[in-house]
């Protein structure tokens, strides 16, 4: 459980600028921020894109 919160905290801090820029109106929870970032993948920074890619792989398993 600590690992999950650590991962989420890392993802949010890594993607903070992109969340503010592309997903500011998106409510937190139920995967909405991830979905927003994934939909804007072409426009987000490289580090955030890596986080989104890894989250997507984890969700697929």
Image: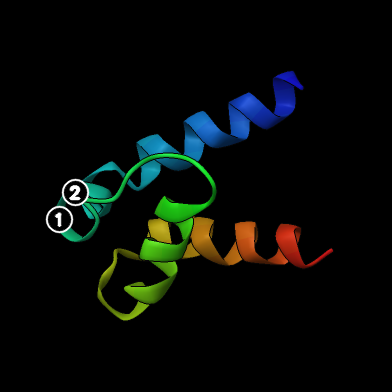
* The disc label shown at residue 21, or none: 1
Contact (Cβ within 8 Å) of mark 2 with mark 1 = yes
Which circle, 2 or 1, is nearer the viewer?
2
Q: Which mark is residue 52?
A: none
Q: Secondary structure at mark 1?
A: helix
Question: Residue 31, percent across and down?
Answer: 52, 52
CA gap, disc 2 and disc 1? 6 Å
Q: Position of residue 47 (x, y in %)?
A: 40, 57
Question: Which labelled disc corresponds to residue 24?
Answer: 2
Residue shown at 60% from the left, 35% from the top: 7
Q: 10 Å neighbourhood of mark 1: few (<14), some, or many (≥20)?
A: few
Q: Is residue 13 above or below residue 2?
A: below
Q: How many marks?
A: 2
Question: Is 26 placed left or right of 1 in the picture?
Answer: left
Q: Residue furthest bottom?
A: 42
Q: Position of residue 2 (x, y in %)?
A: 72, 19
Q: Position of residue 55 (x, y in %)?
A: 62, 57
Instruction: Answer above or below: position of 24 versus 43.
Output: above
Picture quarter containing residue 61?
bottom right
The residue at the far right in this view is 61
Look at the image and tell me in which quarter the N terminus lies: top right
Q: Secondary structure at mark 2?
A: loop
Residue sitting at x 28%, y 42%: 16
Residue at x 38%, y 43% (from the top left corner): 14
Q: Residues within 10 Å of mark 2 (few under 14, many from 20)?
A: few
Q: Is residue 51 left or right of residue 49?
A: right
Q: Is residue 11 above or below residue 23?
A: above
Q: Residue furthest left?
A: 21
Q: Is residue 14 shown above or below 60? A: above
Q: Going 62% across and 25% down the picture, which residue do you hit?
A: 5
**37 sits to left or right of 29:** left
């Amino acid at each position: 459980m600590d690992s999950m919160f650590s991962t989420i905290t890392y993802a949010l801090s890594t993607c903070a600028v992109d969340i503010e820029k592309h997903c500011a109106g998106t409510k937190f929870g139920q995967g909405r921020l991830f979905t927003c970032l994934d939909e804007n993948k072409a426009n987000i920074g490289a580090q955030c894109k890596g986080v989104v890619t890894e989250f997507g792989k984890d969700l697929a398993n």
